[in-house]
Amino acid sequence: DTEVTQTPKHLVMGMTNKKSLKCEQHMGHRAMYWYKQKAKKPPELMFVYSYEKLSINESVPSRFSPECPNSSLLNLHLHALQPEDSALYLCASSLQGTDWGETQYFGPGTRLLVL
Amino acid sequence: RKEVEQDPGPFNVPEGATVAFNCTYSNSASQSFFWYRQDCRKEPKLLMSVYSSGNEDGRFTAQLNRASQYISLLIRDSKLSDSATYLCVVTVSYNTDKLIFGTGTRLQVFP
């Protein structure tokens, strides 16, 4: 089973709302990632968790707050977002996150619209 | 200069055609190389890794030239289902967790 699931599929939120994006994998992977993809642009890395510890934060604004409750789950908490944060948010996982050449498996993404 | 550059296309080709995509990368510390495929409104999926010796998977052939910092993907006998955006992806030796994506090349195969 090479599946990464994400919920919700679509999300519309106001700038004062608080919401969370969820990601789950049951492949035994120990590295999980959040990417942001704007229309007609490639994905851009936001955060990396390796063995449930935050290992990379690509200077993401604090209105995005990641959380890794356990090795299978990754959340992205959203608060006070701006309209320019509207994008497709992709979660990915890989075996360990420490070995070059590892395949990252992507979830289907959450399409977020901030009004 | 972008770290990974690709011709955005679109490449419009008939079924059965052979099409080649090129990609250049600027960081000499780049260590791993991949081609991902992304269908419209879907997530990226790994198509193949790229090795210095070149590698082939069915109709797809990938080549890497480290000296020229150049990667290519050749698709033979194009199918309608090959229509997608092809993303050139690299990682660097000091940050192997981070996939650095090119802007992607759009391929449209027509009947």
Image (tube, coloured by chain):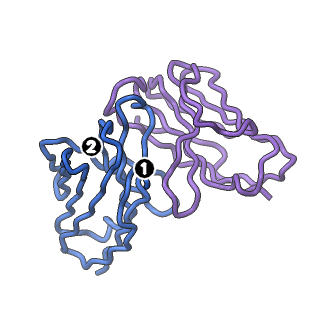
Residue shown at the point (35%, 52%) measured from the top left: B88
Crowd class of label 1 (few under 14; some 14 to 19; many from 20; radius 10 Å): many
Disc 2 is placed on an element classified as strand
Q: CA distance from mark 1 to mark 2?
A: 14 Å
Q: Quick check: marks 1 and 2 in contact, CB under 8 Å?
A: no
* Residue in the picture at 51% in, 59% down: A41
Above or below, B43 against A25 in this view is below
Question: Residue at point 45% right, 23% down?
Answer: A28
**Tag 2 residue:** B49
Residue B111, position in %: x, y? 29, 81
Label 2, residues with CA under 10 Å away: few <14, some 14-19, many ≥20: many
What residue do we see at 60% from left, 53% from top?
Answer: A88
**Which residue is the extreme one toward the front?**
B1
Q: Quadrant of the C terminus of chain A?
A: bottom right
Does residue A8 appear left or right of residue B32 in this picture?
Answer: right
Output the chain of dot 2: B
The quadrant of the image that shows the N terminus of chain A is top left
Label 1 resides on the chain identified as: B
Which shade of the palette goes to chain A?
purple
Q: Which residue is mark 1?
A: B101
Q: Quadrant of residue A53?
A: top right
Choose between A15 and B93: the one closer to the eye. B93
Indicate the amino acid at tag 2: Ser
Residue A78 appears at what percent x and percent y?
Answer: 75, 40
Q: Colour of chain B?
A: blue
Closer to the eye: label 1 or 2: 1
